[in-house]
Amino acid sequence: MISNLWILGNSDISIPLAIRKTVFSDDLGLPNNEAPDAFDPQAMHLIVLDEGKPVATGRVYHDGQTFRIGKCAVLSEMRGKGIGDLLIKLLLLKAFEFNPSEVRIHAIGHAVGFYKKYGFRETGEPFIEDTAEHITMTVTKETLVIPAGCGEDRGYKDFFKDDKPI
């Protein structure tokens, strides 16, 4: 059974940090993902669980200008099972609850296509963050797309049955 848990950054965020370390540092070889950063204390952290085991994480926070989604990570054994789609949908739903004009993400190069299917658009030029190339992407309520079958085709059909539309 897939479930989720939201925790505030001023709480114990050891589970999101552990997933980030596994995915970013161990799997991708990106440094500096073991410790909290300046945005962690103010963020709302999402943990996706499979049969009670944490398998993915991401966060939503306000960076002083707009809402951002970041530090999205899915454990390697869960990739390709729709968990990333579930994660992004939940993060977007949470971010748009605050009625921002846009939601921003710093997308690592290989994930740009993944975010485009949600209506994110590239803005600006690529830059280096944590030793990897990223690009800023934004999505608005007008450009937002929740792909058909987002998670539903993988047995999560009832997971969103009570979600309100964006």
Image (spheres, rainbow, N blue to C red):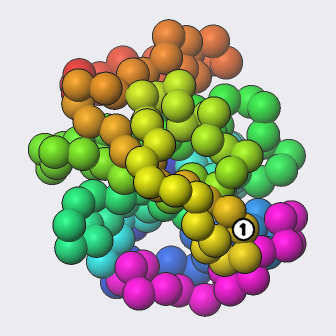
- Classify mark 1: helix, strand or loop: strand
Question: As drawn, is 30 to the left or to the right of 130?
Answer: right
Q: In front: 1, or 91? A: 91
- Foreground residue among 11 and 110: 110
In the rendered view of the protein, which quadrant contains the C terminus?
top left
Judge by depth and name the residue closer to the eye, 31 or 17.
31
Please tell me how many numbered marks the rendered image carries.
1
Q: Name the residue under label 1.
A: 132
Type of amino acid under label 1: Ala
Q: What stretch is highlighted in magenta?
A: 26-41
Residue 160 versus residue 134 in the image, above or below: above
| Residue 156 appearing in the image | no
Report x, y in % for residue 71.
55, 63
Residue shown at the point (68%, 63%) measured from the top left? 133
Give percent across and percent down for residue 152: 56, 15
Residue 63 is one of the magenta-drawn residues: no
User: How packed is label 1: few (under 14 Cα within 10 Å), some, or many (20 or more)?
Assistant: some
Judge from the rendering whether residue 101 lies leftward or rightward of residue 117; answer left or right.
Answer: left
Which residue is located at x 68 percent, y 86 percent? Answer: 32
The residue lying at 52 percent from left, 56 percent from top is 125
Q: Quadrant of residue 27?
A: bottom right
Q: In this view, does 39 lie above or below 59?
A: below
> Which residue: 85% across, 73% down?
29
